[in-house]
């Protein structure tokens, strides 16, 4: 029997819609530039960055404006939850929150993406649905009720099966992995007091409230 130097951290998990079970999260992959965006040119293959499981929080949380940034931004995304043998367990609506100024600096080769993308409370997920098939459903986001992002899932350059197939050539995908599949154009800054609502047609919405920095 193993004896730990201190208590291990609890298992990170996500809610499953209509069930009293939870989805244990192993890793989080994110797809970059997967929608037509005039500010970004896509490549011939999808590219990825990762977030630690510790970055994940459920919907309807209140979080402080993060440290180290003056430009905190929202990105609404379709999230794929993987089951055994890289099968699709379900889907959810999620938010990929970013410290945009640090992220832009990283794009210029100054530093790694981690500071801009992988930090506390930067991956928000709504309940996972096992009864959903992505197609042309609307994906949208509002801040305090004002529209910010609106597109169709059909606008994704790389569809879910293609993403899983390609990602599986780079990593051993396993049950518990999440894939944030990219965000449409319209990302923008949020401030203390803002209420963010991300929606994908036929999925439970995801909510997040920003509070002042401690």
Image: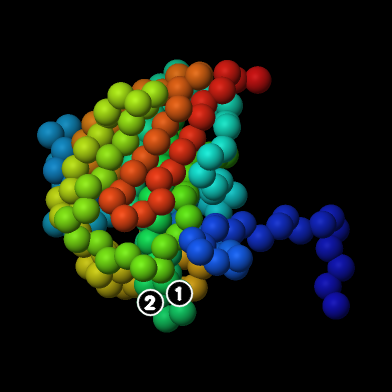
Mark 1 and mark 2: span between their CA atoms? 5 Å
Q: Is residue 171 visible?
A: no
Pinpoint residue 5: horizontal percent, then vertical percent.
Answer: 85, 58
| Any part of residue 86 in sight | yes
The residue singled out by tag 2 in the image is: 87
* Image position, residue 92 (x, y; %): 40, 56
Q: Residue at x 87, y 68 (%)?
A: 3
Q: Are marks 1 and 2 in contact (CB under 8 Å)?
A: yes
Looking at this view, is 88 or 157 the one in front? Answer: 88
Q: Residue at x 36, y 68 (%)?
A: 131
Pick out the residue farthest to the bottom: 85
Residue 13 in which image quadrant: bottom right
Looking at the image, which residue is at 54% across and 58% down? 15
Question: Where residue 83 is drawn, which disc sits there?
Answer: 1
The percent position of residue 63, horizontal first and vertical second, equals 57, 31
- SS at badge 1: loop
Q: Would you call the spot at circle 1 few (<14 residues within 10 Å), some (14-19), or many (20 or more)? A: some
Q: Position of residue 78 (x, y in %)?
A: 33, 53
Q: Secondary structure at mark 2?
A: loop
Of residues 53 and 90, the one nearer the viewer is 90
> Residue 99, relative to residue 153: is it above or below?
above
Q: Work out whether residue 158 or residue 136 is closer to the camera in this orientation and state it.
A: 136
* Label number found at residue 173: none
Asked if 128 appears above or below 165 in the picture, the reply is above
Q: How many marks?
A: 2
| Rendered-image quadrant of the C terminus | top right
Question: On screen, 164 above or below 209?
Answer: below
Residue at image position (39%, 76%) is 86
**Quarter of the image that includes the N terminus:** bottom right
141 lies left or right of 28: left
| Mark 2: few/some/many CA within 10 Å (<14, 14-19, 20+) | some
């Amino acid at each position: 029997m193993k004896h730990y130097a201190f208590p291990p951290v609890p298992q990170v998990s996500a809610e499953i819609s209509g069930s009293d079970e939870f989805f244990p999260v192993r890793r989080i992959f994110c797809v970059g530039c997967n929608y037509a965006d005039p500010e970004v040119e896509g490549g011939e293959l999808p590219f990825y960055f990762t977030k630690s499981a510790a970055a994940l929080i459920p919907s309807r949380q209140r979080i402080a404006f993060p440290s180290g940034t003056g430009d905190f931004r929202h990105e609404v995304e379709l999230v794929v939850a993987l089951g055994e043998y890289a099968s699709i367990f379900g889907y959810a609506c999620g938010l990929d929150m970013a410290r945009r100024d640090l992220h832009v600096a990283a794009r210029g080769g100054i530093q790694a993406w981690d500071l801009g993308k992988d930090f506390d409370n930067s991956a928000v997920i709504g309940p996972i649905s096992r009864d959903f098939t992505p197609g042309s459903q609307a994906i949208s986001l509002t801040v305090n009720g004002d529209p910010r992002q609106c597109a169709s899932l059909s606008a994704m350059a790389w569809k879910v099966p293609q993403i899983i197939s390609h990602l599986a050539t780079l990593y051993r995908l396993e049950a518990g992995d999440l894939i944030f599949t990219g965000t449409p154009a319209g990302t923008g800054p949020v401030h203390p007091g803002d209420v963010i609502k991300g929606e994908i047609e036929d999925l439970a919405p995801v909510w997040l409230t920003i509070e002042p920095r401690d």
